[in-house]
């Protein structure tokens, strides 16, 4: 696979021998949801994983983390598909000229009026 993330560490890692920090920790470092490509950039050898653990970091096996990540990725995709189905449905309703329920529209109009009123208030200088 790849070398240990620690600079100049010569250890070549195999999925079964690699360690990674928690997905949460990696996410904090990279600032986005961890994808499997990203996970490979945060692998450590046993010795360095132990050293990081001593620093208080939780380290997990690469293979089980990858499985967890793929499971989450699958969940996200399923969610996206579901959202896609709903958006298609709602957009189709909109195109068909189906209007939202009146009550909701009234509530919105009322909010707008309150905001307009608030903006119209003259504050004496
Ligand atoms: Zn190392």
Image (cartoon, grey):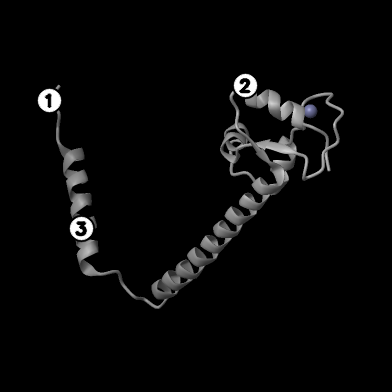
Q: In which quarter of the image is ligand 1?
A: top right
Give the percent coordinates (x, y) of residue 72. Answer: 58, 53
Q: Is residue 40 left or right of residue 84?
A: right
Q: Residue shown at 34%/75% (left/top)?
A: 98
- Please state, as top left, top right, bottom left or bottom right, where the N terminus lies in the image: top right
Q: Circles 2 and 1: CB distance less than 8 Å?
A: no
Residue 77 percent location from the top left of the image: 58, 60
Q: Is mark 3 on a helix, strand or loop?
A: helix
Please tell me whether mark 2 or mark 3 is closer to you in this view: 2
Q: Which mark is residue 55?
A: 2
**Numbered mark located on residue 107 in the image:** 3
User: Circle 2 — which element?
Assistant: loop
Whether residue 35 can be seen here: no
Structural crowding at the residue carrying mark 1, measured as other residues with C-alpha within 10 Å and reported as few (<14), some (14–19) or many (≥20): few
Q: Earlier in the sequence, mark 2 or mark 1?
A: 2
36 vs 22, left or right, is: right
**Splitting the image into 4 quarters, where does residue 15 fall?**
top right
Numbered label attached to residue 67:
none
């Amino acid at each position: 696979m790849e070398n240990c993330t620690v600079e100049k560490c010569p250890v070549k890692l195999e999925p079964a021998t690699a360690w990674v920090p928690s997905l949460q920790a990696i996410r904090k470092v990279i600032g986005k949801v961890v994808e499997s490509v990203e996970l490979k950039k945060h692998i450590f050898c046993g010795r360095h994983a132990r050293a990081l653990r001593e620093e208080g970091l939780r380290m997990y096996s690469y293979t089980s983390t990858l499985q967890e990540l793929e499971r989450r990725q699958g969940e996200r995709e399923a969610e996206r598909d579901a959202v896609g189905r709903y958006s298609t449905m709602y957009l189709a309703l909109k195109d068909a000229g189906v209007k939202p329920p009146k009550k909701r529209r009234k509530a919105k109009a009322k909010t707008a009026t309150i905001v307009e009123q608030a903006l119209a208030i003259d504050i004496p200088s």
